Image (cartoon, coloured by chain):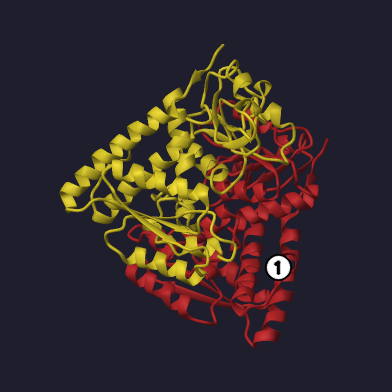
Chain colours: A red, B yellow
Amino acid sequence: MTASIIDGKAIAAEIDARARHTAEALARISGRKPGLAVVLIGDDPASDVYVRNKGRRAEAAAMRSIEIRKPAATTEAEVIAIVQRLNADPSVDGILVQMPLPGHIDSGKVIAAIDPDKDVDGLTPVSAGRLLLGQSGLRPCTPAGCVILAERALGKLDGKSVVVVGRSILVGKPAALLFLEKNCTVTIAHSKTRDLPALCRTADILVAAVGRPNMIGGDWIRPGACVLDVGINRIPAPEKGEGGTRLVGDVDFDAAKDVAGSITPVPGGVGPMTIALLLRNTVQAMARREGVDIPVAAA
Amino acid sequence: MTASIIDGKAIAAEIDARARHTAEALARISGRKPGLAVVLIGDDPASDVYVRNKGRRAEAAAMRSIEIRKPAATTEAEVIAIVQRLNADPSVDGILVQMPLPGHIDSGKVIAAIDPDKDVDGLTPVSAGRLLLGQSGLRPCTPAGCVILAERALGKLDGKSVVVVGRSILVGKPAALLFLEKNCTVTIAHSKTRDLPALCRTADILVAAVGRPNMIGGDWIRPGACVLDVGINRIPAPEKGEGGTRLVGDVDFDAAKDVAGSITPVPGGVGPMTIALLLRNTVQAMARREGVDIPVAAA
């Protein structure tokens, strides 16, 4: 069997287009564009690329992108003051503080300062609590993207068995709760799990979110399973010349694609979904703040 | 094999005794007892019994019990005002609003009004978020009690496979996260799970939290497993005369005890742990509020 390749880039583009459509409708109703503020402290080159991508895609989706860049020496109190100003600014619907923050800043304190109704990354304690309690709220982007990709590949997810490998607060744990909301039977596995390969082979949907290149082999995968690879690992690629590198996931793609029913590539699978869901969260946050009722599916 | 019976009553009494010890130490340091406020709206007879039990055990553990009883006609705004007064009262360390509230009151709004640092039931969005994010905070009592019973039965839990049947916000979902914190591999199952008996048979620790009398049969249990029965179901017991009833769990105890390695009875298993953990949460809340460092194990 050769797996069908899940085209995350194309699906993300569809979500971006729908977010743009919703953003334009909201602008007609309220007279202003949805506003997404991204705060970047310091000059990490990778963060710089991420922040510019977010801004570019927000503007392409008819939103207003606000970039706030401050030097690495900015104090924790100053960062929190920036967040509070954005909380109070009625033209800002979404606030994202780019991680990682410089070491002298407690990122937990900064995140907790974000208004949960503008928390488009879904990382504040209140957003996490709403997710756990099944209340409406803004969900973390990458795991929400995983659920959409699984639905595209499999249709209705009721009763599917999901194994999530990795228990991070960014991906593993929220992904487990989001698949649970879809009536899946969900197992959370991690480094202490016994016989992880055998457990993975029980999964209809396997979510790999560990950060270890090519860890999950073809013989870990149930024939026909849907494999979602969240890992983005840069490894040496001597074939590209001296110092060359390339990106691989947590799944050994070449081996897995002969066993799985569907699989996300790296790059181009889960990755592009993260910003798409960020944009969707931003229009949903604006709709909620403006009291406009937009069905999730339409946003 | 005949399972060892996990004596929840005795273990709860030990935790009560330690909570009393800590409460006395805190009283010596701060000059006041830990204060636990319980709010009861209406005159549901079962709730009345629960609230009196909580008050009695709090006082036996050297705490101050504050009972606030209001008629069923009390408005939502009045209940929230009571909660806010208790939030502001420095002599109150723990606040518990007895559920269920009368139908005209939105219990979500009332719970969200509780100061998370006094939320000894662990039910506010912030407490739930702290649990999901792995931050320190007050944990829901019944699932925290389940983890303690499993540790008493099995010792270290690392790598054990846990199946939680039921995904309620009171028990199932928080229990899954608490066992995950103990490095267990955790599966959350529910009514949509396919072949639930076979899944249950994979569990080293089986947590039943469904609310269906005797649903889980002996052949659902892996030989030697630890079975924690959270269900408390009242069923007819004609042997007790006309109208007689008795309490049973979600597990068919008589069948299960021949297969399991250890099992909680109903009543007398998980049930008594809930108030014990409530008392432990109350002393922990006071210690935190007073800036006193008390190790969890000692509380």
Residue at coordinates 36% horizontally, 67% vertically from top-left? B85
Using the image, determine if residue A116 lies above or below residue A165: below
Q: Position of residue B180 (x, y in %)?
A: 50, 38
Using the image, determine if residue B109 lies above or below residue A239: below
Q: Is residue B194 visible?
A: yes
Please indicate whether residue B60 sits to the left or right of residue B180 in the image: left
Query: Quarter-wise, where is residue B232 in the image?
Result: top right
Image quadrant where one finds the N terminus of chain A: top right
Query: Quarter-wise, where is residue A203 in the image?
Result: top right
Image quadrant where one finds the C terminus of chain A: bottom right
Q: Position of residue B283 (x, y in %)?
A: 30, 47
Please indicate whether residue B283 sits to the left or right of residue A233 in the image: left
Three-letter amino acid code at the position of disc 1: Asp
Residue at coordinates 20% horizontally, 48% vertically from top-left? B27
As helix, strand or loop, the secondary structure at mark 1 comes to: helix
Residue at coordinates 46% horizontally, 79% vertically from top-left? A88
Q: Quickly name the residue at label 1.
A: A16
